Amino acid sequence: MLSASAASIPPAPKQTRQSFGQGALSPPDLCHVPSPESEVYDHYNATRNHKS
């Protein structure tokens, strides 16, 4: 069941966040999804800014 949930997170992290926010499945799982994504974006932006 966790696999199906994870597959539904990447496509729409914003929509799943609201649905999961109510505690439908696992709130911790969602917190782990945006965390890595945010870090990656930050790193990418920081590297691009530094190069420019």
Image: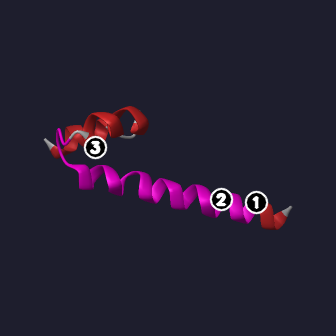
Which residue position holds label 1?
48
Q: In terms of depth relative to the viewer, which is nearer, 25 or 48? A: 25
Disc marking residue 6 = 3
- As shown in the figure, which amino acid type bears the numbered disc 1? Arg
Task: Report the residue that reaches farthest toward the left.
Answer: 1
Q: In whole angstroms, how far apart are the C-alphas of marks 1 and 2? A: 6 Å
22 over 43 or under it: above or below: above
- Within 10 Å of disc 1 (Cα), the crowding (few <14, some 14-19, many 20+) is few
Q: Quadrant of residue 45?
A: bottom right
Nearer-N-terminus badge (3/2):
3
Q: Which secondary structure, mark 2?
A: helix
SS class of the residue under badge 1?
A: helix
Q: Residues within 10 Å of mark 2 (few under 14, many from 20)?
A: few
Quarter where residue 25 is shown: top left
Residue contact at pointers 1 and 2, CB within 8 angstroms: yes
Residue 20: give x, y in percent of width and height.
26, 40
- The amino acid sitting under disc 2 is Tyr
Q: Residue 23 at what x, y percent from top left?
A: 19, 43
Q: Residue at image x 34%, y 40%? A: 17
Find the magenta span and give its range.
23-48
Which residue is pictured at 30% across the width and 38% down the height?
7
